[in-house]
Amino acid sequence: MSTPDPAYRRPIDLKHGRVDLAFGAGGQAMAQLIAELFARAFANDYLARGDDAAVLPALTAGERLVLATDAHVVSPLFFPGGDIGSLSVHGTINDLAVMGARPLYLAASFILEEGFALAELARIVDSMATAARAAGVAVVTGDTKVVERGKGDGIFITTTGVGALPAGRDPGGARAQPGDAILVSGTLGDHGMAIMAQREALAFESEIRSDSAALHDLVETLYAATDASAIHVLRDPTRGGLASTLNEIAAQSGVGMLVDEASIPVSPAVQSACELLGLDPLNLANEGKLVLICAPHATASLLAAMRAHPLGGEAACIGEVCIDPQGFVQLRTCLGGRRMLDWLAGEPLPRIC
């Protein structure tokens, strides 16, 4: 992502202008877009060098590198509680955080469609920059491509993150054990329903906002509350929601799970909207919640740590891991019966992240 001086031509009209094919052609127009928009928004010493990659400081002894990448194609681009820009930062930071890593740096790749409004692009980039600064993470390199009109959908963003995993931390989907407690950090389904409401112009009595947020500080709080070995699994239940996430972990670990429906936090607004639309909140995407599976002795301290954090005020213990060679996830219903909590079949909410 080179950042030459744009003085050779008049400034780009970021208020009324449109993306042009020349912005992705590798010439002066592309260099000017990078200098006047991306480099200005993400300003840091690594990016200012203008090289093809960033040379980063070595990690301290005992820490391991963690790398994560994610593509973001949400529609609509702007929604209550966020937009594709902040979402692209939060999504990759969270992929690092649930591995126990401290996020350090981000790379960003933009695929733009010819004719996309530069004002909207600037708004998205500014949102990304704000989210990255708030998380203490620098966007240190990137790439921009432009496709012909009609061959894209405005903007797609891919972000790649680098993090540092401190010694002693080793959460993973294959580490759930019978007897472990299953915790969630707050209400479920907020992001998926916010996208649905915005896309379909649905009006509810209470506005439903996306929960999009960076989870790394919450994860650090959890590790400070107990010994690292007690935290067995961390996962952010994005596409497919809680149901698919628990089934994925159960399959990785070769265990079963029993979850209490009455203990699962869902906001009244999301619950009402799901009943109206025939959707299950446990299948809806989340972008600012985590699932934690931990040793039983650490349940109380971790739940208290969650609830004391701004992102975990409605945290709850929702069930436990059990022995089950079939790897079934079962839901103990409010009526006292049990039903299978299965993987999401199909995709009720396309383009949610």
Image: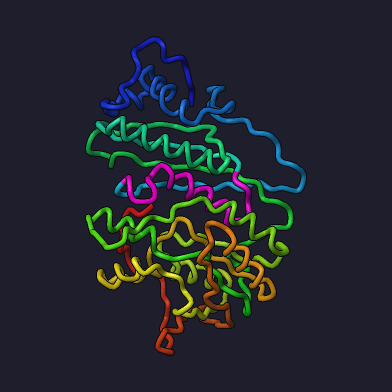
Residue 78: quadrant of the picture: top left
Residue 208 painted magenta = no
Measured as percent of width and height from the top left, residue 176 is found at 61, 71
* 92 and 149: which is toward the camera: 92
Residue 274: quadrant of the picture: bottom left
- Colouring of the image: rainbow
Measured as percent of width and height from the top left, residue 26 is found at 39, 22
Residue 85 painted magenta = yes
Q: Is residue 25 above or below residue 238?
A: above
Measured as percent of width and height from the top left, residue 74 is found at 34, 49
- Specify start and end residues of the magenta stretch as a single range: 77-103
Residue plotted at (41% across, 75% down): 342
Q: Is residue 206 above or below residue 75?
A: below
Left or right: where 232 falls relative to 138: right
Residue plotted at (44% across, 29% down): 38
Extreme-front residue of the structure:
205
Measured as percent of width and height from the top left, residue 188 is found at 43, 65
* 313 and 292: which is toward the camera: 313
Extreme-right residue of the structure:
61
Residue plotted at (50% across, 48% down): 92
Extreme-bottom residue of the structure:
336
Residue plotted at (43% across, 59% down): 286
Left or right: where 155 falls relative to 289: left
